[in-house]
Image (tube, grey):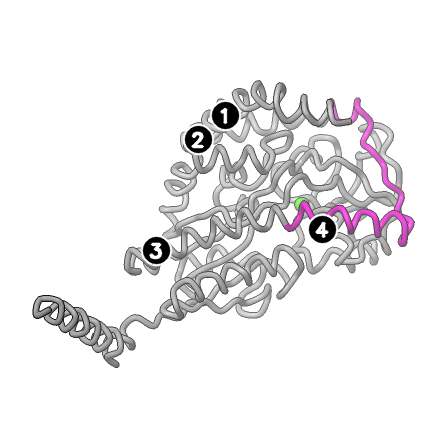
Amino acid sequence: MKRRDFLKGASAGSLLAGTAIAGSPAVRAETKIKWKMVTTWPKNFPGLGTGANNLAKLITEMSGGRLSVRVYGAKELVPAFGVFDAVSRGTAQMGHGAAYYWKGKIEAAQFFSAVPFGLTANEMNGWLYHGGGMELWEQMYAGFNLVPAAAGNTGVQMGGWFNKEIKSLADLKGLKMRIPGLGGEVLKRAGGTPVNLPGGELYTSLQSGAIDATEWVGPYNDLAFGLYKVAKYYYYPGWHEPGTTLEAIINKKAFDGLPKDLQAIVRNACSVVNQDMLAEYTARNNAALHDLVTTHKVQLRAFPDDVLQKLRTLSDEVVGELAKKDKSAQQVFDSFRKFRDQVRAWHDISELAFLKARG
Ligand code: CA
């Protein structure tokens, strides 16, 4: 009896002591951290913007408010394409966007968002998390005082919106199209003029004729922007973006200054959002495609096989040349290509064979 009473007393005592420590004003003041997250998306934009919101909410909730994150849409704090610099210099502690937007700073960053005829969402995650990709990405961004994380994926995108039919590669000549990253380089080689514009400017640019065509994401997001009102044909597949990874970037100094448990929360919240966004796109693209075709009478078109074949040849050239730019690009390309070759052999007899069998 006496021993039990003693133990009871001891545990109540430690509980009290624990409460006192965690509740002391000094400790609370020290552990409340507030971060800003700047994004390349219009605030609350379905899928992309709401994914960034989810990421902030998860970090805030999982940390019990010890680390709270406030989200800023494009232009609220910095312009869409100012996100990388803002987080790098610490104006904001976090950012959400896509790595191919930073090709002007680090060309090989494009491998970590989308490569034409490259990896699907599932394959990207395999490469990043278990195929050496993440380590290479971290190495590349460390020089900019940034920690990268995969934080969303759109799945296979659509080929884009056009006001004329694409029947041969010649139809791409002279075409001014919004298409970022390596896909844009491929279009240039096919005789087109690629431009990179933030999502929020696509509708008016297409409407005013500043651009002739645009790609954005897929049915769910393209419907939200109303692109069907300013273009007649909707082409598939998104050869240039087979499974685009969205990124979270974290100011390295801010990240290194966090206690280990908060670092784990930030990393794991990114992983959750990475997976959840893909699930959301998979679910919502179906409904949106139906809406576009039945309600808005959008003309769906497939790129002809020979056009895709030529685009693939041009893509191989563009990606191969990028790899030769510097040592780090070559290293990333080697890792990416090795993974792609191996996963293709496996997916030929798994995903592809199954999808064909299902019909
Ligand atoms: Ca896109």
Left or right, 357 with reference to 291: left
Q: From mark 1 to mark 2, how far is it between C-alphas?
A: 7 Å
Given residues 309 and 344, the one toward you in this image is: 344
Tag 4 and tag 2, C-beta contact below 8 Å: no
Element type at mark 3: helix
Image location (x, y in percent) of residue 282? 67, 45
**Amino acid type, residue under disc 1 in the picture:** Phe
Outermost front residue? 1
Considering only order in the chain, which callout, 2 or 3, is on the residue closer to the N terminus? 2
- Local SS, label 4: helix
Left or right: 252 as drawn, with respect to 70: left
Of badges 4 and 2, nearer the viewer stands: 4
Residue position for label 2:
131
Residue 298 in percent (x, y) is at 88, 47
Marks 4/1 in contact by CB < 8 Å: the verdict is no
Which residue corresponds to mark 4? 284
The quadrant of the rendering that contains the N terminus is: bottom left
The answer to whether 286 appears left or right of 44 in the picture is right
Q: Is the C-beta of the residue carrying label 4 under 8 Å from the nearest atom of ligand 1? A: no
Q: Residue type at mark 4?
A: Arg
Q: Are marks 1 and 2 in contact (CB under 8 Å)?
A: yes
Question: Which numbered disc covers residue 339?
Answer: 1
Residues shaded magenta: 280-309
Three-letter amino acid code of the residue under disc 2: Gly
Q: Nearer the viewer, mark 3 or mark 4?
A: 4
State which quadrant residue 235 falls in: top right
Foreground disc of the pair 3, 1: 3
Q: Earlier in the sequence, mark 4 or mark 1?
A: 4
